[in-house]
Amino acid sequence: MIELGVNIDHVATLRQARATWEPDPVWAAVEAHLGGAAGITVHLREDRRHIRDEDVRRLKETTQVKLNLEMAATDEMVDIACRVRPQMAMLVPEGRQEITTEGGLDVAGQTARLQEVVARLTAAGIVASVFIDAELRQVEAAARIGAQVCELHTGPYAHAFHAEGRDREAPAVRRELERLRQAGASIVQQGMRFNAGHALNYYNAQPVAGLPAVRELHIGHALISRAVFIGLRAAVREMKALLNNTREVVA
């Protein structure tokens, strides 16, 4: 059964809008867990625009499901991860001006540095993950640096899905889904875990959930948006029901 990891960054974004103490991301993590989430994801950015260091510490102490820390491959972030020890750390590209992560990490272009980072994380008992585009050269590079998990960037697929009027059978959508399928197969063949995420929502998540061997989807904005109207626990339950009602995609 596919697992759902809930990204709660935007709960902290709402808190930061008033520079106050609520809503509390830790409370959001508890609600997501009660709704059926198998994990919680947060991105501790260099500029601390939403999630803060104290949030990560409290989440590790409080959360009863897997904590996935998204982070840039900087010395500062690696030091924090090794001190807090989340169950998983996902290396992502990071830009000061971006609204959200805009693309996959170029693992192939910085293998020496990332191999060092992955080695430090692994030595601390943390599962090392990389967020990459659905490109075979990036999958191969991830295997070379010792990553245990590859999360495929589903943004291009999600954008095609929206542009084609939510038509799952549109050629552009099928092309992007096939790229994900091929990259996912390569991930599994090289002994890594296949996860996926970015821009997934209640309309487009099922085809990705149906890809062979995908283990986990990470979803954030769509769930927090839905939670505004029905609450986070119910929003997570709805998404879990969708994912559990998915049939495997046949090539």
Image (tube, rainbow, N blue to C red):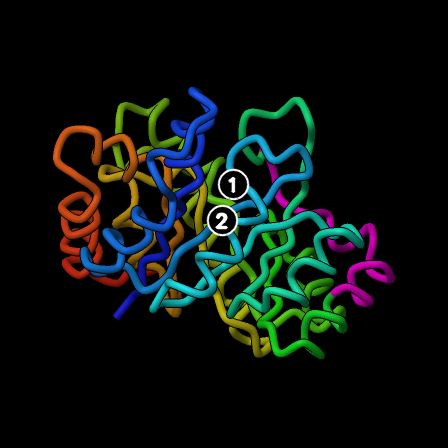
What amino acid type should be assigned to the residue bearing mark 1? Ile
- Give percent across and percent down for residue 126: 60, 72
What amino acid type should be assigned to the residue bearing mark 2? Asp
- Give percent across and percent down for residue 7: 40, 46
What range is drawn magenta here?
102-117
- Give percent across and percent down for residue 113: 85, 59
Which residue lies under the disc numbered 2?
A: 55
Q: Residue at x 46, y 57 (%)?
A: 58
Q: Residue at x 55, y 25 (%)?
A: 99
**Marks 1 and 2: which is nearer the front?**
2
Which residue lies under the disc numbered 1?
A: 51
Indicate whether residue 213 is drawn in magenta: no
Dividing the picture into quadrants, the one containing residue 43 is top right
Asked whether residue 74 appears in the rendered view, the answer is yes
- Give percent across and percent down for residue 54: 54, 49
Residue closest to the far front: 21
Dividing the picture into quadrants, the one containing residue 48 is top right
Q: Residue at x 30, y 46 (%)?
A: 28
Asked whether residue 171 appears in the rendered view, the answer is no
Residue placed most toward the observer, 42 or 240: 42
**Dot 2: few (<14), some (14–19), or many (≥20) neighbours within 10 Å?**
some
Dividing the picture into quadrants, the one containing residue 84 is bottom right
Left or right: 127 as drawn, with respect to 2:
right
User: SS of the residue at dot 1?
Assistant: loop
Residue placed most toward the observer, 179 or 19: 19
Indicate whether residue 114 is drawn in magenta: yes
Q: Is residue 100 above or below residue 75?
A: above
Q: CA distance from mark 1 to mark 2?
A: 6 Å
User: SS of the residue at dot 2?
Assistant: helix
Q: Residue at x 65, y 69 (%)?
A: 147
Left or right: 246 as drawn, with respect to 20:
left
